Amino acid sequence: MNPDVIVIGAGAIGTSIGYQLARAGAKVMIVDRGQVGREATGASAGMIMAVHGRSTPVPLVALASESARLFAALAEELKLRTGMDIGYRRVGRLRVAFDEATEHQLRLERGWQVDHGAIVSWLDPASALDLEPALNPTVRAAIYYADEYQLLPVAFAQALSRAAADLGAIVREGAAVDRLLIEGDRVTGVAVGDERVHADEVVIANGSWAGGWSDPLGLPIPIRPMRGQLVALRTLGTALRNVIDAGDGYALTKPDGSTIVGTTVEDAGFDARPTASGVEGLLKLAPQLAPRLADATFSGAWAGLRPGTPDGMPLIGRLPRWRGVLLAAGHFRQGILLAPITGELVADLVARRRPRLSLEAFDPGRFLVRAA
Ligand SMILES: Cc1cc2nc3c(=O)[nH]c(=O)nc-3n(C[C@H](O)[C@H](O)[C@H](O)COP(=O)(O)OP(=O)(O)OC[C@H]3O[C@@H](n4cnc5c(N)ncnc54)[C@H](O)[C@@H]3O)c2cc1C
């Protein structure tokens, strides 16, 4: 029996969409060429950073705030449906300054955030060290975001996928979509090897690889992979209590006890391997953030490909000139944070319900206008 909707990609975005569609009663098939949550999603730090800075586009701030708000109920719902704990935990974030110029930037940042209703505290070095004893004592000042969260990203995608499957969705791993099936101006399904699967709607949610559908659809889908590397350390001493965020890098202790340090932002094509210089930079950064990390043992390094877009905003919506196809990709550095709202909005679009937030700024057609 053909599904109503095929979702291409089982990262945080595809599984969230699949879950919301299944929850709304649609017959869904989620197809991934690898395993659930093992690409960018699995590589991510899993931070749910609710407070944004001056440089974030306004529509993205609204999208992110709404998504952050949805997490607590979603984590609970997934636990009830699947028994899985996605590691959703509150973790404060200290945005730290070690030099005068950064301190000045932080003051401006805080002013903007307070003007926009965020609850953020300014800390002198003594208060910052009180909150985070592991922090480098040369800190000059910090902003404290008390109400932020983190989770285990692979568990998050797996729980979404399992919850969708419990609701009747078919989740296929190891199944690459080789091409879209097209009849006139309509996408009618996908080809997986020799097999053809038809559906009323196809949702493209394959992250950094979504740009590959530009040619068959004859539309610009300007999504590019931006590599990010992370290292994982094990400490004998107490874990970090907070995320230590220096702007160009961060450290945090995950619910599984490992402390991760990230990250790079590199244009390295589709190469998702960590490099010697990337790892070296992160290992140097670790003790600059928290000196005790110099004694930590090294437990691993990995990289993932963030789906980047020219304007830093995702592409969510129907594709111009085409019927039967939607796009939800390009979430760059915030795909975990934005997964819950993306799932809900795409489910609304498929059901032809009015989405709860305006999607105008995220319209995939915006690049077509620019290209014309
Ligand atoms: C180092 C690092 C740290 C990060 N930290 C954070 C963070 O703290 N918070 C946050 O919100 N975000 C973070 N991100 C960003 C976040 O990981 C991404 O935005 C998010 O994972 C994108 O999800 P996705 O589902 O679009 O893509 P992916 O997770 O890459 O999933 C796409 C899926 O599509 C599949 N696929 C590709 N082509 C095909 C095909 N032809 N057929 C079938 N399947 C296909 C792939 O196998 C893959 O599973 C981080 C990213 C990195 C790399």
Image: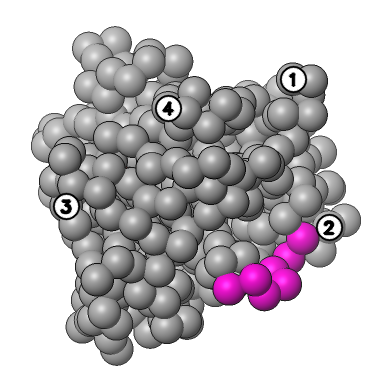
Where in the figure is residue 47, as x and y percent of width and height? 44, 53
Q: Residues within 10 Å of mark 4 (few under 14, many from 20)?
A: some
Q: Residues within 10 Å of mark 2 (few under 14, many from 20)?
A: few
C-alpha distance separating marks 2 and 3: 43 Å
- What's the amino acid at mark 2? His
Instruction: Look at 29% across and 82% down and name the residue there.
Output: 167
Q: Which mark is residue 371?
A: 1
Where in the figure is residue 324, as x and y percent of width and height? 53, 54
Front residue of 124/251: it is 251
Q: Visible in this render: residue 143? A: no
The answer as to whether callout 4 falls within 8 Å of ligand 1 is yes
- What's the amino acid at mark 3? Glu
Mark count: 4
C-alpha distance separating marks 4 and 3: 20 Å
Q: Is residue 87 left or right of residue 93?
A: left
Q: Disc 2 designates what residue?
A: 116
Q: Disc 4 designates what residue?
A: 212
Main secondary structure of the magenta stretch: loop
Q: Which mark is residue 41?
A: none
